[in-house]
Image (tube, rainbow, N blue to C red):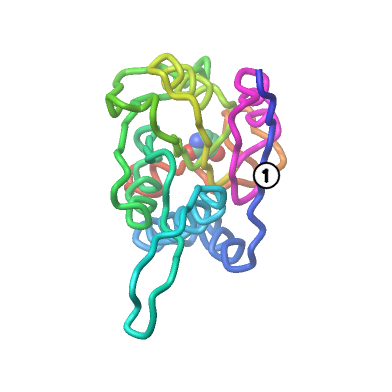
Amino acid sequence: MLRVMKVTVVQHPLLQHKLTLMRDRETGVKEFRELASEISMLLAYEAMRDLETEPVRLHTPIAEADLPMLSGKKLALVAILRAGLVMTDAVVRLVPAAKIGHLGMYRDPETLEPVAYYSKLPHDIAERRVFLTDPMLATGGSAVAAIDTLKAAGAQSIKLMTILAVPEGIRRVQDAHPDVEIVTAAVDERLNDHGYIVPGLGDAGDRIYGTK
Ligand code: URA
């Protein structure tokens, strides 16, 4: 098996600035959501850096030229519900022809393990490059379960896009799925006893949707 085990931490100052604003507990729902969208697009810019292009001959108003256009496998964005939705909604603005899948999972508050309740994926996912979105890579349980589901459906090329990660979540994903690259905006210190990332940004779903 190909062992990639790659984690990309996108350290662009613009993205880091926006992430700090997201972390601030005084940041309200509207701004939090906007920041999550903007950060998702910046992450996608990095995660999609290796998309293939091929030259296409066309006429500009001035001259004829061979110019790059996306080629290769088509894309699928897959959101882990519910917080991952804000990320796919943002990223699809950059790649509007991408198909979008949804995986419903919640964390059992006692065991902190994922419980799957919904799965709807593009039927041709095996032929697509998949970008899986979940803002928080905490224990890694949901991410591993989501990747298991994607692979069972035939997906062969998967990248995980996440806004915050912790080392134990990264390790868990890498142990289970070493071929899956992780693209994140930051790697925080640790998880607390309730499974929250420290210093983190709180419950991403609650802050995106204004629930508590
Ligand atoms: N999920 C969240 O929304 N926040 C955390 O800190 C950990 C998991």
Q: Amino acid at mark 1?
A: Val
What residue do we see at 44% from left, 61% from top? 38
x and y percentages locating residue 172 in the rendered image: 64, 23
Label 1 environment density (alpha carbons within 10 Å; few <14, some 14–19, many ≥20): many
Q: Nearer the viewer, residue 89 or 155?
A: 155
Q: Please name the residue that numbered disc 1 is placed on.
A: 187
Left or right for 212, reference 120? right
Estimate the x, y position of residue 189 in percent, counting from the top left.
72, 41
Q: Nearer the viewer, residue 4 or 186?
A: 4
- Asked which quadrant contains residue 195, the reply is top right
Counting the numbered discs, the total is 1
Q: Against 23, is 141 above or below?
A: above
Q: Which residue appears at 50% of the width and 32% of the height?
A: 158
Point out the image quarter for the C terminus: top left
Locate residue 171 relative to residue 111 in the image: left or right: right
Question: Which quarter of the rendering shows the N terminus?
Answer: top right
Was residue 138 drawn as part of the magenta stretch in this picture? Answer: no
Along the line of sight, which residue is nearer the eye, 97 or 160?
Answer: 97
Residue 161 percent coordinates (x, y): 52, 42
Residue range highlighted in magenta: 165-188
Vertical placement of 189 versus 104: above or below? below
